[in-house]
Amino acid sequence: MFFRSYFSFMLSFLLASILSFSAIADIELPLGVGMDTIILTNMSDVPSAVDELTASLEQQGFSIPLIINHSAAAASVGLELAPNQVIFARPSKFLEKQLLKKSMTMGLDLPLKFLVYEDSKGIIKLSVNSLGYLIDRHEIKIRDFVLRLTDKLIEQFSTTGKEGQGLITVKSSQSVEETVQALQDAISVNPATRIPLVLVYGKNKRPSPVLIVFGNPNVGTPLMQVDSRIGIDLPLKFLVWEDKEGQVNITYNNPFFLAERVDLEGQDPRLAAIANALKNIAKAGAGDNR
């Protein structure tokens, strides 16, 4: 019955997120892949929208471990970016634990992300990852026969198949703790790269999965200058987790997949450089010295 309550929770939450802005939100089409976008018609600026949404999330039981101000980060390195902030919203520990039980890689998309940004016309918008996208991406199996509409729901909102999940997983020869430390050491080699959050998920029988959030505004800002929506997947992340066989893994997002979500064009050289950097950091974290 978990998924019955889970779906009810998520669907009612998404509805409540819209209604919390009163009758001032319009759904925008076309959408990014696996992404719903809401126009906040009565919001005059991004900071006010972030404050209101943060308060609404906290009232609904979410904790907010991190808010990234992408435009402020860009300004800190002398770059310009329209107002753009992403809220990391962590659900209840019970729900989080159940989701990780179903799929450990779900930790890469938890906390949930809420991107608030100003588009080129000065319109304030909110983008969130759709429910079906998360279910499909992490291959969450649903066996609650009470949910007769589950298949239709997934068919309607799901956007990625097994070959298009955008998840890269590397096996580590080290423990979770050693892998996390090695990743942080490799990330910190570049002084321009920041690690604003290291999140240890709830205790399980196996070592707890750990999410490392990191980014360099010199790298991410040019992508968001082309399409603000990619900010929902920035900063970058590594998830360190142990499977049932005791194998420690590092999972991260393929930057080309993130770009395809918003149909980002003309950035292949930059994306290739990011992909190569992620690959090398993951190798260092895994204890691969070749």
Image: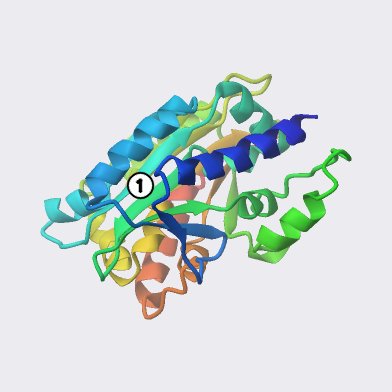
Q: Viewer-proximal residue, 126 or 244?
A: 126
State the residue lying farthest toward the bottom.
Answer: 266
Q: Viewer-proximal residue, 152 or 162?
A: 152
Which residue is drawn at the image coordinates 53% and 26% (left, top)?
Answer: 201
Q: Position of residue 28 (x, y in %)?
A: 47, 65
Q: Position of residue 170 (x, y in %)?
A: 58, 49
Report the amino acid beneath label 1: Val
- Left or right of 202, for residue 82: left
Instruction: Determine whether 286 is above or below 123 in the image.
Output: above
Is residue 289 visible in the rendered image? The answer is no
Q: Position of residue 34 (x, y in %)?
A: 57, 60
Instruction: Determine whether 81 is above or below 102 in the image.
Output: below
Is residue 9 visible in the rendered image? The answer is yes
Q: Viewer-proximal residue, 128 or 242?
A: 128
Please identify the quadrant where the N terminus is shown: top right
Q: In which quarter of the view is residue 248 placed?
A: top right
Q: Position of residue 221 (x, y in %)?
A: 26, 61
- Left or right of 141, for residue 188: left
Which residue is drawn at the image coordinates 40% and 69% (left, top)?
Answer: 271
Instruction: Determine whether 144 is above or below 219 in the image.
Output: above
Q: Secondary structure at mark 1?
A: strand
Which residue is drawn at the image coordinates 26% and 50% (left, top)?
Answer: 46
- Left or right of 65, for residue 248: right
**Residue indicated by mark 1:** 86
